Amino acid sequence: MDKVYFEDVSIGDKTSYGSKKVTREEILDFARKYDPQPFHIDEEAARKSIYGGLIASGWHTAAMLMRMMVDCMVNKRAGLGSPGFDNLRWIHPVRPGDELRFESVVIETRKSTSRPDMGIIRADVRLFNQKDELVLTMKSTGMMQARPE
Amino acid sequence: MLYWEDFTIGRTLEFGGYEVTEEEVIEFATAFDPQSFHIDKEAAKDHYFGGIIASGWHTGAMCMRMMVDGYLHDAASMGSPGIDELRWKKPVRPGETLHVKAEVLDRSLPKSRPELGFVKFSHTVMNQNDEVKLTMVSSGMFLRTPEEK
């Protein structure tokens, strides 16, 4: 299939995808490696914490979102990586058994001034759980190849 | 134990020593960011980045682990509301060793929650040659120092 290039993306383009089921084992496994705070790795301590139970590391939540974005969008694009993101908010904790889905809307497209073979795409990304509670929001930025002449 | 009062504006902390291995780069990206330049050594050679690089989310997760080991394990940490700005400045490659410099930028006390406060940090992730790999402005929530009874 032909790749999606910068010119193929327009402001207002909307993508929805999911769901991804979150397991207790994944939450514990990720947090033991990357975020071993009591409310991510210790059931008993988590129950007594302000969260009232085990919750996923925010980095794990973001990584699960990235996986969904790669599966439905990023791997179809002539992508060149990302310089970063802005305004990431962990709004609602993610718990074992939750099912996550995301929506993204393109809010800006511009050609790179320094590299004419490249364009920059910004999007509003929102992650929801199975109760349609908003879990995470961020403004993402991606770099894409311009369509070859 | 570090409480909100201990994070005075301008205070800096340095910590880390995270060795990035090829095995871990591929393992993380296979789970969460399966783009060719993160998981496929052969494809990565011909790519823009000229070799396998860590997923940016993996770099963020490694930063998180260094933060937990560096100061959060000894702090009354209540989690984080989010990240204002994150920039992936340079690719992280297997064989590098990462460390972090943190600085307290600002702090505040919410009226609604007298038991805790917010601290805004900058975190800079560097490799063994002090090349900047990632910069981040983010916030953490910490309990107030308990009153002596």
Image (cartoon, coloured by chain):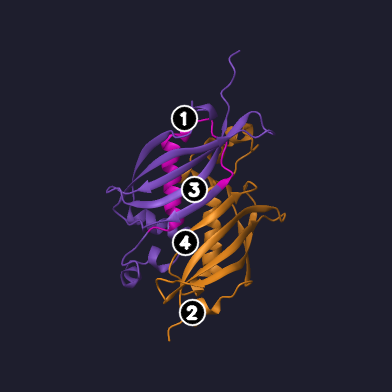
Chain colours: A orange, B purple
Determine if marks 1 and 3 fall on one subunit. Answer: no
Residue type, numbered disc 3: Phe
Q: Is residue B92 above or below residue A71?
A: above
At mark 1, the secondary structure is helix
Circles 4 and 2 on the same subunit:
no
Q: Circle 3 sits on which residue? A: A30
Q: Along the line of sight, which residue is nearer the eye, A43 or B119?
A: B119
Disc 2 residue type (three-letter) = Lys
Tell me whether the residue at label 3 lies in contact with that at label 2, contact meaning CB atoms closer than 8 angstroms. Answer: no
Number of other residues with Cα within 10 Å of mark 1, as a class: few under 14, some 14 to 19, many 20 or more: few
Of all chains, the one bearing label 3 is A
Q: Horizontal and vertical percent for residue B1?
A: 49, 25
Question: Which residues fall within the magenta stretch?
Answer: B54-82
Q: Residue at x 32, y 73 (%)?
A: B46
Chain ID, mark 1: B
Residue that carries the numbered disc 1 in the rendered image: B74
Q: Which mark is residue B33?
A: 4
Between disc 3 and disc 2, whose residue precedes?
2
- What distance separates the C-alpha of mark 4 from that of mark 1? 31 Å
Q: Secondary structure at mark 3?
A: helix
Mark 2, residue position: A3
Give the chain letter at badge 4.
Answer: B
Report how far apart the C-alphas of labels 1 and 3 lie in the structure.
20 Å
| Secondary structure at numbered mark 2 | loop
| Chain of the residue under label 2 | A
Q: Mark 4, mark 3: which one is toward the viewer?
A: 4
> Which is closer to the viewer, label 4 or label 1?
1
**Residue A140 in view:** yes
Q: Quadrant of residue A19?
A: bottom right
Q: Nearer the viewer, mark 4 or mark 2?
A: 2
The answer to whether residue B135 is above or below residue A44 is below
